[in-house]
Image (spheres, grey):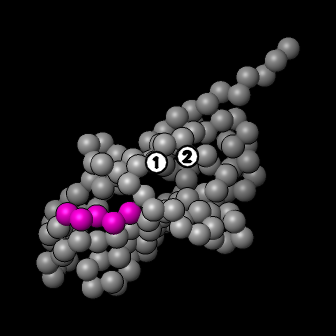
């Protein structure tokens, strides 16, 4: 008998919508990525430091396009130039259930006032 480690491949997509004025210029986003989820392909990100006892790895992306109030801009995935693809195998899936974690982000706007948030990793994917 053998148990195969099935791999599920996913790609992250991030869209930013600027709701309030003033007009916005370039911006930067910082992601805290769960270190136990292997990234298979990454384009456009700068690698940062390990965070929170090596549970997360920081990745940053500078967006050099202007965003205006009311505009939606896809900054990761789809037709954008930034790509983050990752894999889930059965071991990672089981580890995630024993230690749940979130995907954290910080968006730095032109005035460098950070907008922070997090999403449960479970809500990003259907397993």
**Residue at (30, 55) in percent of width and height:** 75
- What main secondary structure does the magenta stretch of the protein show? strand
| Residue 102 visible to the viewer | no
**Residue at (61, 46) in percent of width and height:** 38
**Residue at (69, 65) in percent of width and height:** 54
Q: Quadrant of residue 62?
A: bottom left
Q: Is residue 84 left or right of residue 87?
A: left
Under circle 1, the secondary element is strand
Please name whichever residue, 72 or 52, is drawn nearer the observer in this view of the structure.
52
Under circle 2, the secondary element is strand
Disc 2 versus disc 1: distance between alpha carbons? Answer: 7 Å
Rendered view: 72 above or below 107: above
Q: Residue furthest top?
A: 1
Determine crowd level at label 2: few under 14, some 14-19, many 20+ residues with C-alpha closer than 10 A: some
**Residue at (78, 22) in percent of width and height:** 3
Q: Residue furthest right?
A: 1
Mark 2 touching mark 1, by CB under 8 A? yes
Q: Is residue 67 left or right of residue 30?
A: left
User: Residue 63 at what x, y percent from top left?
Assistant: 28, 64
Q: Quadrant of residue 34?
A: bottom right
Please name whichever residue, 79 or 104, is drawn nearer the observer in this view of the structure.
79
Please name whichever residue, 121 or 63, is drawn nearer the observer in this view of the structure.
63
The quarter of the picture where the N terminus appears is top right
Residue assigned mark 1 = 42
Residue assigned mark 2 = 39
Q: Is residue 41 left or right of residue 20?
A: right
User: Residue 108 at what x, y percent from top left?
Assistant: 35, 76
- In the image, the segment drawn in magenta is 61-65
Q: Is residue 50 magenta?
A: no
**Residue 90: which numbered mark, if any?**
none
């Amino acid at each position: 008998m053998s148990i195969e480690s099935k791999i599920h491949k996913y790609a992250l997509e991030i869209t930013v919508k600027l709701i309030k004025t003033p007009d916005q210029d370039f911006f930067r986003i910082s992601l805290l990525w769960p270190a136990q989820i292997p990234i298979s392909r990454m384009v456009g990100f700068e690698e940062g430091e390990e965070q929170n006892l090596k549970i997360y790895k920081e990745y940053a992306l500078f967006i050099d396009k202007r965003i205006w109030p009311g505009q939606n801009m896809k900054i990761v995935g789809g037709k954008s130039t930034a790509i983050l693809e990752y894999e889930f195998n059965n071991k990672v899936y089981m580890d995630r259930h024993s230690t749940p974690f979130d995907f954290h982000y910080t968006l730095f706007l032109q005035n460098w006032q950070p907008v922070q948030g997090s999403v449960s990793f479970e809500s990003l994917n259907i397993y």
